[in-house]
Image: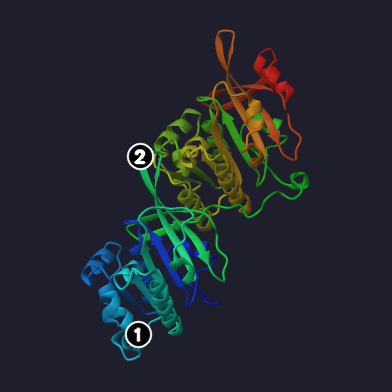
């Protein structure tokens, strides 16, 4: 039951530690999905970093092509060949079949001399050049795999599929120990994205479902689907009674919260466009700096320079805080953002550095990536908030809501259950002026002021003003919550 690393970041996590040593793993996918890249990375990693010499058997590419393609990722396969840690053999299926079964054949001799532990065969689809009879093909595969298992090799085999057919099972899937499927799917009608899924892993657990995958200049990387490690908070009220309060830096809001947000809890700041959600978040992080607490700002809407300009307009020197190392800005454009890749980038950032406050601005920019899959969006946000909680980080997530969206809908949305606190910011016409109002719609495990308050934004920050009289239809709705 020994597990070995595939060498593909993230894929070992999907297999909960790697694939089983001595297993035969089938990698299926359409042309261009990345099957060969996965196989070469598996072999290179083993030979370079694990002292596990490898052999590549190819039925359609010449060694020079593989040398060239591998160098694009910085993998010098020829150097490994000179060290007798790797061998690439270009042959035909028939010749290879005979060599494998011949104990004195070239393949068996080289495998013994090199002490080969990993084999990559590209691809088993070419066995149909030997026979197209399905019974004979299955017997051929069984015999071939049994011979490799007896040799103690861990084997990756690729197989082409013409297109994605859900529910279709090939006989090759039955005879191997594990099956990996790579998809290239069209998203948002104008982009294509790679996903990877483990369909089978005999004798070991794995994370099911599709996982985002990318191929860049370092090779292949998998981003396992984020999953929350805890399904609920145990006795949140008891936690709230004993936990430290984290001041937001907005005096009136802290009074409404009876001292501030609860340490390690999460808050959703939802509001109309232009209702100062980002300013609330900036002041929250700036207050953390005065408290000696480092902050992380995950910016999906504004560039770092725009954030610094916004902060300057409310009297905050964000640039100085960043230069001093008190605030770190993680910026991504929402146009082509991969939420799974973002999650793991955040996770790696939290592992490398210590933060006490985190802001995600904004959830609205992430939502299109989930293609109206509300359940997956909710699970993703839950996993993200759970990640912050594990690090005892107090977090604020902003989200834009439509001008006509009733606050009741915010509270009863699928996302509301994820957050401990919900703060609604609204723009309301009062006589001939547009006024900004705030109300705490939810504070888990704590008393709070539920009144509707006016607030304004000045060059000295956000000022929460007097209680707003309930004269509008909007405020009557709030009273009924």
Dot placed on the residue nearer the N-terminal end, 2 or 1: 1
Residue 467 on image: x %, y %: 69, 19
Q: Which residue is mark 1?
A: 111
Q: Secondary structure beneath disc 1?
A: helix
| Marks 2 and 1, how far apart at CA | 47 Å
The mark tally for this picture is 2
Q: Nearer the viewer, residue 200 or 187?
A: 200
Q: Is residue 148 above or below residue 215?
A: below
Q: Is residue 53 left or right of residue 243?
A: left
Q: Nearer the viewer, residue 413 or 293?
A: 413
Residue under the image location 67 percent in, 51 percent down: 231
Q: Are marks 2 and 1 in contact (CB under 8 Å)?
A: no
Q: Is residue 310 left or right of residue 34?
A: right
The quarter of the picture where the C terminus appears is: top right
The quarter of the picture where the N terminus appears is: bottom right
Residue under the image location 59 percent in, 43 percent down: 395
Q: Which residue is mark 2?
A: 190
Q: Residue placed farthest to the top in the image?
A: 431
Q: Is residue 445 left or right of residue 210?
A: right
Q: Secondary structure beneath disc 2?
A: loop
Q: Nearer the viewer, residue 131 or 303?
A: 131
Residue 49 on image: x %, y %: 40, 74
Q: Residues within 10 Å of mark 2 (few under 14, many from 20)?
A: few
- Which label sits on residue 172? none
Q: Residues within 10 Å of mark 1 (few under 14, many from 20)?
A: many
Q: Residue 44: tell me if it is visible.
A: yes
Q: Quadrant of residue 25?
A: bottom left
Q: Is residue 285 above or below residue 451?
A: below
């Amino acid at each position: 039951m020994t597990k070995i690393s595939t060498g593909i970041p993230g894929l070992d996590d999907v297999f909960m530690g790697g694939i089983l040593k001595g297993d035969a793993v089938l990698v299926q996918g359409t042309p261009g999905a990345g099957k060969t890249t996965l196989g070469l990375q598996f072999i290179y990693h083993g030979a370079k970093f694990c002292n596990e010499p490898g052999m590549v058997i190819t039925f359609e590419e010449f060694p020079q092509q593989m040398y060239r393609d591998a160098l694009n990722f910085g993998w010098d396969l020829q150097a490994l060949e000179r060290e007798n840690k790797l061998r690439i053999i270009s042959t035909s299926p028939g010749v290879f079949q005979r060599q494998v079964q011949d104990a004195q054949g070239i393949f068996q001799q080289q495998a013994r001399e090199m002490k080969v532990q990993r084999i990559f065969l590209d691809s088993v689809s070419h066995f149909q050049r030997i026979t197209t009879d399905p019974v004979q093909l299955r017997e051929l595969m069984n015999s071939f795999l049994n011979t490799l298992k007896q040799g103690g090799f861990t084997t990756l085999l690729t197989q082409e599929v013409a297109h994605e057919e859900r529910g279709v099972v090939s006989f090759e899937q039955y005879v191997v120990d594990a099956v990996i499927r790579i998809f290239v799917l069209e998203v948002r009608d104008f982009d294509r994205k790679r996903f990877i899924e483990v369909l089978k892993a005999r004798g070991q657990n794995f994370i099911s479902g599709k996982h985002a995958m990318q191929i860049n200049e370092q090779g292949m990387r998998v981003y396992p689907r984020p999953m929350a490690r805890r399904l609920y908070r145990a006795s949140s009220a008891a936690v709230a009674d004993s936990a430290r309060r984290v001041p937001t830096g907005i005096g009136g809001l802290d009074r409404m919260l009876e001292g501030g947000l609860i340490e390690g809890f999460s808050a959703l700041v939802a509001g109309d466009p232009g209702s100062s959600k980002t300013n609330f978040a900036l002041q929250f992080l700036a207050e953390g700096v005065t408290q000696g607490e480092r902050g992380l700002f995950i910016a999906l809407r504004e560039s770092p320079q725009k954030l610094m300009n916004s902060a300057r307009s409310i009297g905050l020197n964000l640039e100085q805080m960043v230069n001093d190392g008190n605030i770190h800005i993680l910026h991504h454009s929402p146009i082509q953002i991969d939420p799974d890749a973002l999650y793991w980038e955040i996770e790696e950032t939290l592992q490398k550095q210590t933060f006490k406050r985190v802001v995600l601005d904004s959830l609205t920019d992430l939502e299109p990536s989930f293609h109206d899959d509300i359940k997956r969006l909710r699970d993703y946000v839950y996993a993200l908030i759970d990640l912050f909680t594990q690090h005892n980080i107090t977090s604020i997530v902003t989200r834009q809501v439509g001008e006509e969206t009733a606050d009741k809908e915010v509270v009863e949305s699928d996302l509301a259950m994820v957050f401990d606190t919900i703060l609604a910011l609204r723009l309301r016409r009062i006589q001939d002026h547009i006024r900004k109002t705030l109300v705490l719609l939810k504070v888990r495990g704590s008393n709070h002021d539920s009144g509707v308050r006016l607030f304004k934004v000045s060059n000295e920050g956000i000022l929460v003003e007097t209680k707003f009289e309930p004269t509008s239809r909007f405020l009557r709705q709030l009273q009924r919550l």
